[in-house]
Each structure stands twice: as structure tokens, then as C-alpha cells.
Amino acid sequence: MILFQNAKIFDGNKIISSDSVLVENNIIREIGKNIKANKIELKINVNKNFLMPGLIDAHFHANTPNYDFYSSDRYPKNYIAFHAQNILSDTLKRGFTTVRDAGGGDIGIKMALNERLFKGPRFFYPGKAITQTGGHGDMRNSEYLETCGCAYDGNITQVVDGEDDMRRVVREEFRKGANHIKLILTGGVSTNLAPIDMKHFSDAEIRVCVEEADRRNSYVMAHCHTDEGALRCVQLGIRSIEHGSLISSKTATKISKSGNFVVPTLSAGHLIEKNSKQLGLSNQSLQKVKEVNKKRSLAIQNCAKAKVKMGLGSDLHGREYLQSQSRELILRSEHQENIEVLRSATVVNSEILQMKDKIGVIKENAFADLIILNGDPLKNINVFNDTNKNVSFILKDGQIIKNLLT
Ligand code: ZN
Ligand code: ZN
């Protein structure tokens, strides 16, 4: 058993008055003051520092080694797997003890993690993201003359047309253990594949997708930038609206009433705009990114005002750019109170992942995923600027991943 003492504890919702946490194997056993227990193997004096649940990134990509999505979709699978290993183990060392993959992550990664071939965060995956012919994520360029999407076998996305095809593919992903389904509902920002306001899929196709996910007690997350797309998500039962960059106040109210979630992704746009040349972005894409970045803030404010449940996701690609993964919290704090940002990265994300009370919380019987920070992010969220230095301790599933305290 591990006993944490003398801690300032943020339980995922608020600061609590207790100062000690007892962990037995991979479970939080007790929270209180002056906890007494036999068989304590390790006592950790947190020294009044900040103890909180491990961070959750609800929009993550393990299988894209870089921002060249066309290549990522075509790289040999073994090559991708080595990148995924690096990406995931780095992520855990930053204090993210759980990630939700948003396209490409599959059972292979999960098996490797289960067998402890390497140390990574808890991994929730959708298999390949689902797009339509000619949609964002259809990685065949226009010179690619094969007419059938199924002849092209990409790593990240797959092309689906029609209700029957949708039903089959969604069932296939669940057969392969998917935790959720990723649907692409509007054009994207960082590619020229489809204009941002292009509506993807018929309502009937989306309904089939939602219905099949529902049948597996799961849900759909949808790539969706536009206001119209977000409204469709509410109407058609899509539970997790990704990006949500152009959500109006009217739509935000509807999302709030539906109880569905929005996962804004600020890091990606921020980083792409800053590094457009390095990333080889076309002028057309750069203009899209700039325009969307400007409007994103307003969408978050609309959602916050309407009390939409907002998760937190970085949507970064590749090991190098993921170094700024925790900057997502800092960018969000420009629009919300620090405490709301921390809740997004813990309890709200856990609810999105259907893991309420199991992860993202410091609560009896929850999994022992904990981090200790040098500094109080409620007062200064910039502690997340340097996770190497400021995340001094990481416990994932009861295993010590990092310990700079002893
Ligand atoms: Zn997306
Ligand atoms: Zn994404």
C-alpha cells in the first residue's frame, strides 16, 4: 500500500479538506486525515503540494507520426506502431494517465499495453475514423482512380457510403473492441480534402451509426467544426462533439439541454498557425486555420455561458508537437476559470469516456491514477508549461511511473 500524506487534494471537482490518500494495489482505498493502515510499503510526503487525478486527453492521436496525414495514412503499420509506442509513453510521462484516441488507434495498441510491452496511459480507441467518399479524411487524392473506398486500406480513416455499409463498418469496429466510434461530420481545417462547411453523410447514415453504437452501450464522437454540424449532432444523437469551433449561443443552449459534450481542441489550431511553413501547409489551409482560430474562442465562451459540459483534448499529432500537450489547459484558461479547466481534464473527460467515478477522480474505489504538481494550477495554471519539471510524481493504475520526491 502507498500512503500519500500532507497533500493539498483536488479530487477532480474541488479542493477537499482531507490531506491523505491510501492506495492499495491499483485502487484508491481511503481518503482522510491521519490514515492508519498496516502494510504500508511506501509513505509519500507530498509536502503541501498539489495532488490530483491523472490528466485525461479526450482527443488524442496515437497513430499519426506527423502532420503529413496523407503519409500517416499510408505508412507501413509496423513503422506506425513504433511511433505510437513513443507517443504514448511520452504522454504518460507528462501526467496524462488516460487518452481517448480519435482515429486509427486500435486493438493492437491495446494488446501491447495490456501485455505491458511498454508503459502508456489507459487507452480508449475507435478503430479507424469513418468518413464518406470525398469527405475530410478520404485520404485518396483526386488522381487516385480506384472507385471503391474499400480497395484503399489506410491507417487512420476509412470511407463508408450508405446505411448498410455504415452498419457493417460500425459493427466491425465494435467486433475489434472499439470503445467508441469516430465519425467525420464536416470538412477539416488542416487539409484541403473538403471545405469546412461541407455536410458529411445523410441523416439516415448518421442515425445508423448512432443506433449501432447505442446497441453496444457506446457512443459516437464526431469531428465537427461548424454550427450546423453541431446542431445535427444534437438532433441525431451524437454524444461527443469534437472541435465545435463555430458553435453559436443558440446551438450551445441546445447542446446543454441534450446533456451531450463538446471537446474543444485549441492546441492544434494554435500550433498549426504558428508552424504553418514548417508543416508545409498550403495557403488555403492556413487561411482556414486562421479564420477558425479567431472564432473558436467565441464558441467556447458560448458553450461556457450555456453550461455545456466541455471536455479537454489536445488533438496534436506526432511526438514532437505533443510535447506541448498540456498547453491545452493553459489555452483553455484564457476562456474559463482554472478550476473549470481542471474539471474538464478530469471528471468531465471521465464522464465522456463512460468511466465516471473510476478515473479522473480521487474517490474511494476509483483507480489509482494520481499526479503531484509543484505548484497550484488553480492559482497559476502555467505549471503545465513544463510538465517535465512540474509534474513531480505520477501513479498510473497503482504503478509508480515517475517519482522526483524521494
Ligand atoms: Zn477532427
Ligand atoms: Zn483529431
Image: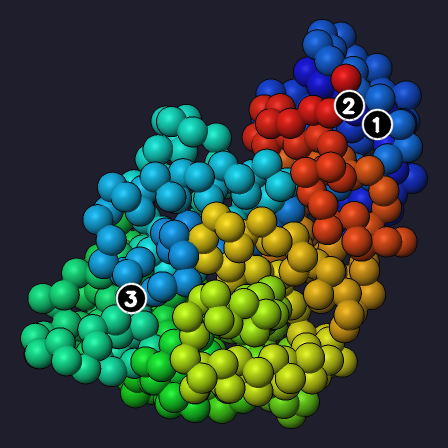
- The residue labelled by disc 1 is 46
Disc 3 crowd, CA 10 A, few/some/many (<14, 14-19, 20+): some
Label whose residue precedes the other's in the sequence (2 or 1) = 1
Q: Residues within 10 Å of mark 2 (few under 14, many from 20)?
A: few
Task: Say what amino acid the circle numbered 2 marks.
Answer: Leu
Location of residue 273 in the rendering, given as x and y in whole percent from the top left corner: 56, 74
Residue at the image point whose x is 76% and y is 73% from the top: 335
Cβ of mark 1 under 8 A from ligand 2? no
Foreground pick, 59 / 270: 270
Note whether residue 362 is visible. Answer: no
SS of the residue under disc 1: loop
44 displayed left or right of 247: right
Say which label, 3 or 1, has the lower sequence index: 1
Q: Give the Cα distance between marks 3 and 1.
A: 46 Å
- Residue at the image position 49 percent from the left and 37 percent from the top: 89
The answer to whether the residue labelled 2 contacts the one labelled 1, judged by CB atoms less than 8 Å apart, is: yes
Q: Amino acid at mark 1?
A: Val
In the image, which is nearer the foreground, mark 2 or mark 3?
A: 3
Q: Which mark is residue 405?
A: 2
Name the quadrant containing residue 1.
top right
Mark 2 to mark 3 CA distance (whole Å): 43 Å
What's the CA distance linking mark 2 and mark 1?
8 Å
Q: How many marks?
A: 3
**At x 44% / y 39%, what residue is drawn?**
86
Using the image, tell me which numbered label, if any, was put on residue 70: 3
Q: Which structural element holds mark 2?
A: loop
Residue 184 screen position, x and y as percent: 37, 74
* Residue appearing at x 40%, y 38% in the figure: 85
**Disc marking residue 28:** none
Amino acid type, residue under disc 3 in the picture: Tyr
- Visible residue check, residue 110: yes
